[in-house]
Each structure stands twice: as structure tokens, then as C-alpha cells.
Amino acid sequence: MLSSDKSICLIFNGEIFNSRNSERNWSGAGHSFATQSDTEVVLESWLEWRPRLCHASYGQFAFALWDRRHETLLARDRAGAKSPSITPRWRTRR
């Protein structure tokens, strides 16, 4: 998922159990949501909390986030229920 200005890219797998509470909090703070996706909640949470969002998120998840203005983050839930995996880019012969 891309942010509206395309400066943040998020690849997310899993579920944030407290995403509805976060969505209500962010809606009150002026954030708008186009979907009911946990992915969008993680993206909006990044805008407010940056890396601290991992401590505030309760669930089973792994994600990779790239922010053009700040940093790249690879994260998973505390229990390690969803493990991120990195695959090298393989070159193919022509």
C-alpha cells in the first residue's frame, strides 16, 4: 500500500488486533481512512508514531515499510508469530 503522496510504501502480512481502536483515535486526530484494512491503520500509525508503532500494535504481523523522508523499517510482532522473509533478487538468463 502506498501513502496518498506516494512517499511511503508498506508491505504488510498479518492482523493488528487493536486496529479498530487505533482507527478511531486517528480519525479523531484528522486522519481519514478509505478502507477498513489493518494495512491502512499501520500506514497512518507510522505517520504519528514512527518506529514506536511496533510497541503500540497488538497482533500477529510482519511488515516492511519504506519512507522516502525518514527510514526503512522491517518489523514483526513481539512473539514472532509472523516472520518476515527476505528473498534475494535473482537474475534470469536471456
Image (spheres, rainbow, N blue to C red):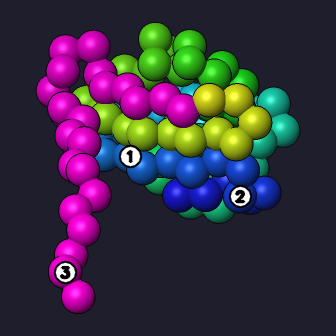
Left or right: 15 in relation to 71: left
Horizontal side of residue 71 vs 36, given as left or right: right
Give the residue furthest to the left.
81
Residue 12 shows which numbered tag? 1
Between tags 3 and 2, which lies in front?
Answer: 3
Side of 18 where 60 appears, left or right: left
Could you tell me the amino acid type at mark 1?
Answer: Phe
Task: Point out residue 74 in the picture as x, y percentages from the top left corner.
Answer: 40, 30
Q: Is there any visible trace of residue 40 in the rendered image?
A: no
Q: Looking at the image, do the residues carrying marks 1 and 2 touch, with CB atoms under 8 Å apart? A: no
Q: Residue furthest bottom?
A: 94
Amino acid identity at mark 2: Lys
Q: CA distance from mark 1 to mark 3?
A: 31 Å
Q: Earlier in the sequence, mark 3 or mark 2?
A: 2
Viewer-side label of 1, 3: 3
Q: Amino acid at mark 3?
A: Arg
Which quadrant of the figure has residue 34?
A: bottom right
Neighbor class of circle 3 (other Cα within 10 Å; few <14, some 14-19, many 20+) is: few
Task: Say which element carries label 1.
Answer: strand
Q: Which residues are magenta?
A: 72-94
Residue at the spot of label 2: 6
Q: Is residue 75 on the magenta stretch?
A: yes
The residue nearer to you, when weighing 88 against 72, is 88
Q: Residue at x 71, y 58 (%)?
A: 6
In the rendered image, residue 16, in percent from the top left (x then y), is placed at: 38, 33
Neighbourhood count class around disc 1 (C-alpha, 10 Å): few under 14, some 14–19, many 20 upward:
many
Q: Which residue is mark 3?
A: 93
Q: Is residue 66 left or right of residue 83?
A: right
